[in-house]
Amino acid sequence: MSVNPAEATLEAYRRWAPVYPPVAHNPLMRAEQFAMRAHWPQVAAREVLDLACGSGRYTRHLTRMGAGRVIALDFCVPMLERVAGKFRVCANMMRLPFVSDAFDVVISGLALGHATNVSGWMAEVARVLKRGGTLLYSDFHPDAALAGLTRSFKDGDQQTCTVPHQSFDVASQRQAAEQAGLTIECLHEVRVGIELTEPFEHSEPFYQRWHGLPIVLVVRARKLEMA
């Protein structure tokens, strides 16, 4: 019997939620967060959507940086229950329950690979962004997926679980952004052994084998002032 990818993804995050802290808790996430912060938009006093927020690590950053209001959205209730934010919404990121032009900024960390398709995801993000607003997102790099790397975790019972993930190549992401009326301002690759260098258990052979491989992609885009 075939498994619905969306259901499999939701079940993975339900299992992960009890042990998923609201901070960057491993070397990959810390390298991803460092790259995201390097391209961080102005958020003070602005309306911000933390899209596919997980346990709320970026919600915490946004709140500390004085965002006017932060909406934390995720499809997994156990994850949302861990978010230390006033405004939490359970919804599918492909069908956002917001009016158009609602947000000055959309932040999304390591979530694009859970979208049904990249064009629909970009179009929905662009719809809820105000003109001139900023999208900043990260995802696992398509080159890493092609190399066979996967994202996995150990749940509370120490059972290893792999998170389902779709890979959208960079050209597809560029095209989807353009079609949605978003102008890409920068693409930032986090590469093994270059930006990602923090040691971890059995990291030496990992760094030797995959040195230079792009493992995370960070993209900053702006919605056109005129539609």
Image (cartoon, grey):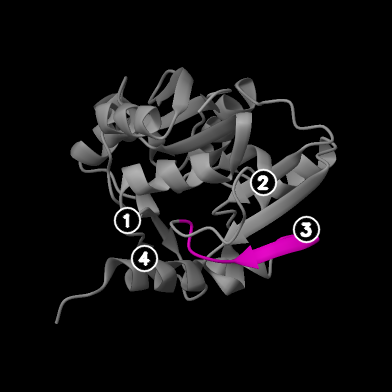
**What amino acid type is highlighted by mark number 1?**
Thr
Q: Secondary structure at mark 4?
A: strand
Q: Earlier in the sequence, mark 3 or mark 1?
A: 3
Q: Earlier in the sequence, mark 3 or mark 4?
A: 3
Q: Contact, CB < 8 Å: mark 1 with mark 4? A: no
Q: Contact, CB < 8 Å: mark 3 with mark 4? A: no
**Relative to 19, does residue 205 appear above or below in the rendering?**
above
Give whichever of 76, 121 is nearer the camera: 121
Whole-number angstrom distance, CA of label 2 to CA of label 4: 36 Å
| Residue at image location 53% in from the left, 31% down from the top | 31
Q: Contact, CB < 8 Å: mark 2 with mark 1? A: no
Q: Quadrant of residue 189?
A: top left
Q: Which residue is mark 1?
A: 116
Question: Neighbour class for label 3 at 10 Å: few (<14), some, many (≥20)?
Answer: some
| Residue at image location 77% in from the left, 59% down from the top | 84
**What amino acid type is highlighted by mark number 2?**
Ala
Q: Position of residue 101 (x, y in %)?
A: 63, 42
Whole-number angstrom distance, CA of label 3 to CA of label 4: 28 Å
**What amino acid type is highlighted by mark number 3?**
Gly
Discs 3/1, front: 1
Q: Is residue 86 magenta?
A: yes
| Residue at image location 32% in from the left, 53% down from the top | 165
The residue lying furthest to the front in this view is: 227
Give whichever of 134, 39 is nearer the camera: 134
Whole-number angstrom distance, CA of label 2 to CA of label 1: 23 Å
Whole-number angstrom distance, CA of label 3 to CA of label 1: 27 Å
The numbered disc on residue 161 is: 4
Q: Earlier in the sequence, mark 2 or mark 1?
A: 2
The numbered disc on residue 85 is: 3
